[in-house]
Image: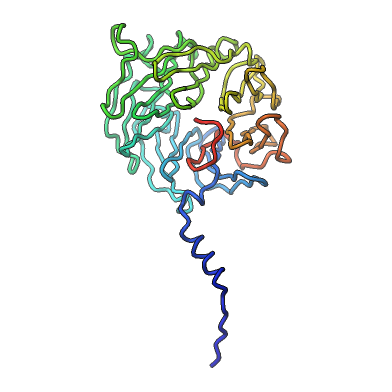
Amino acid sequence: MKFNIRIIPVATILLVALLTVLPAAAQQPAGWIVTTDYSTFGRVRSFDAADPWTVSADLAVIPGDATGRHHDGLVYILGRGQSNLMQVWDPAAGFALLDETSLGSGLNLQDIAFDTEGDAYVSCYDSAVLLRVDPVDGTVLDTYDTSMFADADGLPETSLMAVVGDLLYITCQRLDVNNWYSPTGPGALLVFDMVAEVWVDMDPGTAGVQPIALQGANPYTRILVDGDRLTVGCAGFFGVADGGIEGVDTSAGISTGYLHTEAELGGDINRIQRDGEDLLVVINDAAFNTSVRRAGAGGVDVLDALPGFVHSDIMLLGNDLYVADRTIGAAGLRVLDAVTGVERTAGAIATGLAPGLFIRSATAPVSGVE
């Protein structure tokens, strides 16, 4: 009997061995796109951070109104609205579902953040509570009352979060649920000490536990973190140019006022990203047509404008600005030059369902910080 023996070059063997032991982080994509059918279900797709900017097939089925974060190699999905689900997905295991847990009812989950001890915190919109959760199995470990920060309807409308050291910053919108969610006054950033597990009083001279008072109403965007500087977009009343992008000094615990007003930007603030000292912004005008704009010391430039409420999210990776475009019949991922707005993709790269938001990989190259 004869055997055909194939001699494989040593270099090939070493290459294969190297690829099999690369850390999971090195094999992870630039990020993920959360898509939606605007009703019952959504999907998750990954995308790459280089030309030709490929988008994967559907990786997961998620709630129809969902948000998420990437942390410690895993993707955490929260079902907003009436879903109240937390899902944990593992990209390194073929996007396997590790856990799916209901965190309760009537919560309207908004965002998830993580401390250094391995616990997760989840903000809620329809209940005056902050949850501390086991990120492995979704067990609710503790709850922290937020009703002292509420307006007359009893809800503070807490939403997006950012971690700076051991402190958790949470947007507090203070809207009137009985009047079409209209702002009842300026918004705030709540500050929670994750080590002591207590709310931090940011104004000891005033009775009660006080948050960081904002100039603008309805803090609506992600909180961008850059050292001891936070940036958040306050949308105010939609359809009225009454808000702005606001700065916060965490070392002093105070707002530093507007960096750019909505009147200057040209409409309601929907999304923001920082690129050095400039800000990239999604706004909608009075007719609810969206555009992407770059705001800096030299003024405001329009990078991309389309008819309809179609720019659902942006994410900056290096010099590339990723745009989630939900134009009917042409929905998908587009990539623009972050400075000039020149489109680098030939058109929208299909995402299946309409793209809703981006989840940035924790290992992706970052120019703007969030």
Identity of the residue furthest to the bottom in this view: 1
Q: Position of residue 118 (x, y in %)?
A: 32, 39
Q: Position of residue 167 (x, y in %)?
A: 35, 26
Q: Position of residue 86 (x, y in %)?
A: 40, 38
Up the image or down, 166 lies above or below 45; here it is above
Going 44% across and 16% down the picture, which residue do you hit?
173
Dividing the picture into quadrants, the one containing residue 3 is: bottom right
Up the image or down, 311 lies above or below 266; here it is below
Please indicate whether residue 210 sits to the left or right of residue 368 in the image: left
Going 57% across and 73% down the picture, which residue do you hit?
9
Q: Nearer the viewer, residue 351 or 268?
A: 268
Report how many numbered discs are placed on residues in the image.
Answer: 0
Dividing the picture into quadrants, the one containing residue 99 is: top left
Q: Coloured how?
A: rainbow
Up the image or down, 269 lies above or below 352; here it is above
Q: Position of residue 219 (x, y in %)?
A: 48, 18
Going 51% across and 48% down the picture, which residue do you hit?
28
Identity of the residue furthest to the top in this view: 206
Up the image or down, 195 lies above or below 149; here it is below
Q: Nearer the viewer, residue 316 or 18?
A: 18
Going 51% across and 51% down the picture, which residue do you hit?
27
